[in-house]
Image: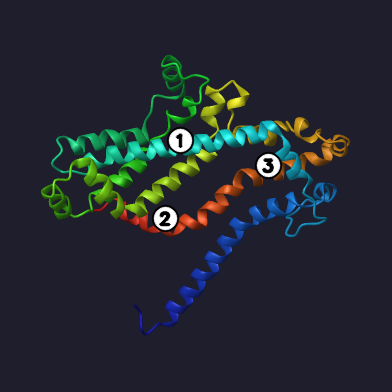
Amino acid sequence: MVKNKTIGYRVFLVFDYVLLALISILCLLPVVHVAFASFSDPAWVMSQSGLILWPHGFNVEGYLQVFSNRQLMGSYGNTILYVVSATAIGLLVTVLGAYPLSKKEVLFSNTLMLFVSFTMLFNGGMIAFYMVVRNIGMLDTRWSVILPTCVSAFNLILVRTAMSTVPKDLEESAMLDGAGPVRIMFQIYMPLIKATIATVVLYYAVAHWNSWFNASIFLTDRSKFPLQLILREILIANDTASTATQSGQVAGNADLYKQLVKYCTIMAATGPGLCFYPFIMKYFEKGVMIGAIKG
């Protein structure tokens, strides 16, 4: 801790706080704009060309149309299913893979880690990826969204590095008491690296929540589409007719409500993530630092 703070240090500290405050404001402005626009009068929203920093004419008609649309709500359920399933499977496989690779006595562990790291830089390409999914019979199934990308090499390296910091004496003591590898992994290693586990869960959940590309090439049944794919159609293709014509009032003003429905759909898609982040971010920095590659 610096006791005698110099003028240069104080200037740097002020500059640092100002810079971080500006970055925070720049990150929050798009969220504020979309949130307030989604609660504003659609005619007023259409007439605006700049940022919206306060709602005008409180209106929830857009949200009513979004949440009354069966296709959107069905895709919401699909996304939750994909996120929970893929995160759970990915976390289990990541831990099961990282545990043996964290042991120096495991034969060829460093070589195996080299192959794992190789997958972060190179892959077979989209055509080969599609052919593999098709040939194993997962095309147009929910498994095609869950399994192919449920494990991340980066997350495996993160967990493996965190496990390698656990003292060897704890494992040896547990083995003397009759504990097996599975019990040691779940009852000793997992509690000690829970910050890293929380970080990995966050990485997996956010990645699968935002994922839409795999669904767009593997799924043709619209009843299995995730929310992000429906959102993409609304934002890019302006496919809001089915949403905007569910009430007489909106039917006569489909074009007027088109932009409002976009904003409401964006908030419906990003809202859970914004609520989830504050409760897990306290583990994020600690988990990343523990799982960082040591020199």
Which percent across, then down, holds residue 146? 46, 30
| Residue 278, placed above or below residue 4 | above
| Residue 119 is at least partly visible in this image | yes
Labels 3 & 2 near each other (Cβ < 8 A) = no
Which residue is identified by label 2? Answer: 284
Spatial separation of the CA atoms under disc 2 and disc 1:
22 Å
| Residue 228 is at least partly visible in this image | no
Q: Which label sits in the foreground, 3 or 1?
A: 1
Q: Label 2: state its secondary structure.
A: helix
Query: Which numbered circle lies on residue 265?
Result: 3
Query: Which numbered circle lies on residue 253?
Result: none
Query: Which numbered circle lies on residue 85?
Result: 1
Q: Label 3: state its secondary structure.
A: helix
Spatial separation of the CA atoms under disc 3 and disc 1:
23 Å
**Which image quadrant for residue 92?**
top left
Question: Which residue, as the protein is rendered here, is positioned at the far front?
Answer: 178
